[in-house]
Image: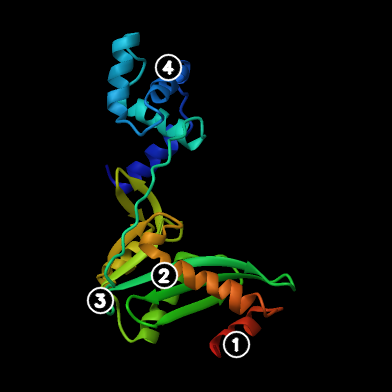
Amino acid sequence: MSEKKYLRYIEKVRYRTKIFEPYQPHILEVYKVNDFQRLEKSAVYDYLEEKLGSLPGTERSFRNYINYLIETEQLKFNGNIRIYYPVEELPYGKQLQIDFGEYRTRKGLKLYIFAAVLSASRYKYCALQDRPFTTLDLINHLLDCFEYIGGIPRELVIDQDRVMVVSENLGDIIYTRDFKQFIEEMDLKMYVCRKNDPESKGKIENVIKFLKRNFLRIRDFGNIEEAKERLSRC
């Protein structure tokens, strides 16, 4: 389905009566027996049909109900242990990681942080503003960043932040309209990862931490102009 149809569909099923609500204990029992591991939803659907007879909805409705149980934390999966291996450093200029942060100064000024770091180099870019980011703010900061580092990277690493990503449709990322147009014009390859994922964008998360703990923690600003001016001298 198209992006618009998918978004309308999401809004529709979000408030749809949960026809599988009476089956919730049976569903949770299936996951309990399987040690709350992730299971194919279609397999769970087939199993319940075998045990309980014809179900009141389609497999699609069933998948939506499982997602509802997950979102409301009625169904929680066992966390898998992640095994870490050292990886080779990326080539110069291949990948630009970006991230956002927030910080409130002692004087009460709330700062919104944009940061970027270029792979295999010392190039780091930071920007501050006193209001939440919009997609156009992000695009302007990226253009300033490209000018600062002297070029455009081959790949941009982001997480599923709302100023860039609307939703995910069966693994396909749906970008905001302006951001989608931007990455197409810039011919940028995208890599979208989960939030707080050190394997994918640990470098930029460290930049955000450094900015908060080293630059901002020992300084106090009462207005955004003062904060920007001081950051530009670092």
The reply to whether the C-beta atoms of the residues labelled 3 and 2 are less than 8 Å apart is no
Looking at the rendering, in which quadrant would you find the N terminus?
A: top left
Q: Secondary structure at mark 2?
A: helix
Residue 91, label in figure: 3
- Type of residue at label 1? Glu
Circles 2, 4 touching at the beta carbon (< 8 Å): no
The residue beneath circle 4 is 26
The earlier-in-sequence mark between 4 and 3 is 4
- Tag of residue 203: 2
Near-viewer residue (176 or 76): 76
Q: The disc labelled 4 sits on which kind of residue?
A: His
- Label 4: state its secondary structure: helix
Q: Tell me the mark number nearer the camera, choosing from 2 and 4.
A: 2
Q: Earlier in the sequence, mark 2 or mark 1?
A: 2
The quarter holding residue 211 reads bottom right
Q: Could you tell which of marks 4 and 1 lies nearer the N-terminus?
A: 4
Crowding around mark 1 (Cα neighbors within 10 Å: few <14, some 14 to 19, many 20+) is few
According to the image, what is the colour scheme of the structure?
A: rainbow
Residue 36 sits above or below residue 82 on the image: above
Q: Residue at x 37, y 49 (%)?
A: 82
Q: Does label 3 or label 1 sit earlier along the sequence?
A: 3
Quadrant of the drawing holding the C terminus: bottom right
Q: Position of residue 196 (x, y in %)?
A: 46, 57
Q: Which residue was labeled with disc 1?
A: 229
